[in-house]
Image (spheres, rainbow, N blue to C red):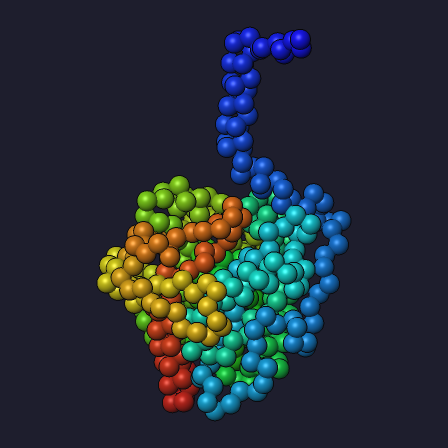
């Protein structure tokens, strides 16, 4: 008759159970560090071979572009759009042009939610660029800063090509989201504001979820609706997330003389999209013309607006937002996806109306021979 296997003593079972709980707890505590480390390219940027550069004379270098010359029935302005982060990292510091997962995220999520508010304002030009990976935005290592400086070189070349070959003297709007907004801030400082011809044709620059120093913004701040030639920048946190608001102040990097540097206690510029101005005044939810979740909508389709979803107020340079009521306006996706621009836009309709008004004001000034108010 076969003997049964020896049973473990109770103390051994208790020890194993304790070890299992300890390992599980450690996994929870260090989960973010483990996931972040998995995105590290593990090669110094100085010895890194970046992906091939895009040629902005080629259509494939543009994620969105009209593909034809401007026509009389087109919207009156152009939109130069710099996309937020869509590439996680792992193999590269900077994303290869056309990387499949990044492309899908741009088409499904970022373009409908963040380009969508501007498609009725102007023709859209959105360059593909070798964006810095998500990992580079989650660490303060010098390698990460080098990756972000590298991404700017593509953006500057794309904008110069657009101005020389596509703009044709038309009014334009700059839109940048998250990483794209940070790059747009440098574009304003180095390419647009020093050039009088470009400066007078810029209706506004919207730097969404972007920190710029209030004391030294890259363009005059938008202090009131219909002001032109100004910058509307904000970084947001929900009103019940003080740790997120503090992280914005502690960890955000801004351009200073072509280099990324910490805020060092300086207050960020805070534009309130519900009020159309840089102000500390409180905006009630009734001023929210329409939030939207446009993810997976057919390109160009107008989403269903959800009105009165959030109120907002600038506090210490951070836009503090009330929690939206609709379940469609909540973060979803993987750990990495939740650290990118969200798959909805709480200010969709307000941004559309604000941009239309500023473009109309600029067009009236230019047609009347009046210099835009900067």
Residue placed most toward the observer, 333 or 180:
333
- The answer to which image quadrant residue 209 occupies is bottom left
Residue placed most toward the observer, 237 or 190:
237
Which residue is farthest bottom?
A: 72
Which residue is farthest front?
A: 1
Taking 87 as reference, is 33 above or below it?
above
Q: Is residue 223 visible?
A: no
Residue placed most toward the observer, 138 or 89:
89
Identify the residue at image location x=41%, y=45%.
244
Q: Is residue 294 left or right of residue 326?
A: right
Identify the residue at image location x=28%, y=57%.
311
Identify the residue at image location x=48%, y=65%.
296
Picture quarter with the N terminus: top right
Taking 264 as reference, is 172 above or below it?
below
Q: Is residue 320 left or right of residue 14?
A: left
Residue 192 lies, in percent from the top left, at 53, 72
Residue 238 lies, in percent from the top left, at 35, 49
Picture quarter with the C terminus: bottom left
Residue placed most toward the observer, 75 or 248:
75
Identify the residue at image location x=75%, y=54%.
49
Q: Is residue 298 visible?
A: yes
Residue 157 lies, in percent from the top left, at 64, 70
The number of callouts visible is 0
């Amino acid at each position: 008759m076969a003997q049964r296997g020896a049973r473990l003593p109770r103390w051994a079972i208790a020890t194993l159970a304790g070890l299992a709980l300890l390992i599980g707890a450690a996994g929870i505590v260090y989960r973010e560090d483990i996931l972040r480390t998995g995105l590290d390219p593990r090669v110094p940027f100085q010895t890194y071979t970046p992906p091939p550069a895009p040629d902005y004379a080629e259509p494939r270098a543009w994620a969105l572009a009209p593909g034809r010359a401007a026509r009389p029935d087109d919207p009156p302005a152009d939109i130069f759009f710099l996309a937020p982060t869509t590439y996680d990292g792992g193999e590269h510091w900077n994303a290869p042009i056309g990387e499949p997962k990044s492309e899908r995220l741009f088409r499904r999520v970022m373009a409908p939610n963040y380009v969508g508010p501007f498609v009725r304002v102007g023709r859209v030009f959105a360059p593909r660029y070798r964006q810095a990976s998500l990992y580079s935005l989650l660490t303060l290592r010098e390698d990460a800063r080098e990756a972000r400086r590298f991404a700017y070189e593509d953006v500057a070349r794309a904008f110069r090509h657009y101005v020389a070959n596509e703009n044709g003297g038309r009014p334009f709007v700059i839109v940048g989201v998250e990483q794209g907004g940070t790059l747009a801030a440098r574009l304003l400082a180095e390419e647009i504001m020093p050039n009088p011809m470009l400066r007078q044709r810029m209706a506004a620059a919207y730097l969404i979820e972007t920190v710029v120093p209030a004391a030294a913004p890259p363009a005059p701040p938008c202090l009131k609706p219909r002001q032109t030639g100004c910058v509307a920048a904000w970084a947001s946190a929900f009103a019940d997330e003080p740790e997120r608001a503090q992280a914005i102040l502690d960890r955000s990097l801004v351009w200073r003389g072509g280099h990324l540097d910490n805020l060092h206690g300086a207050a960020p510029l805070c534009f309130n999209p519900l009020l159309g101005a840089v102000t500390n005044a409180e905006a009630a939810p009734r001023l929210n013309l329409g939030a939207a979740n446009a993810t997976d909508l057919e390109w160009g389709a107008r989403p269903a607006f959800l009105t009165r979803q959030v109120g907002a107020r600038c506090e210490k340079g951070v836009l503090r937002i009330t929690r939206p009521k609709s379940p469609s306006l909540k973060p979803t996706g993987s750990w990495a996806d939740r650290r990118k621009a969200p798959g909805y836009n709480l200010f969709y309709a307000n941004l559309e109306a604000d941009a239309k008004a500023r473009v109309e004001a600029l067009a009236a000034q230019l047609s009347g021979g009046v210099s835009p108010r900067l």
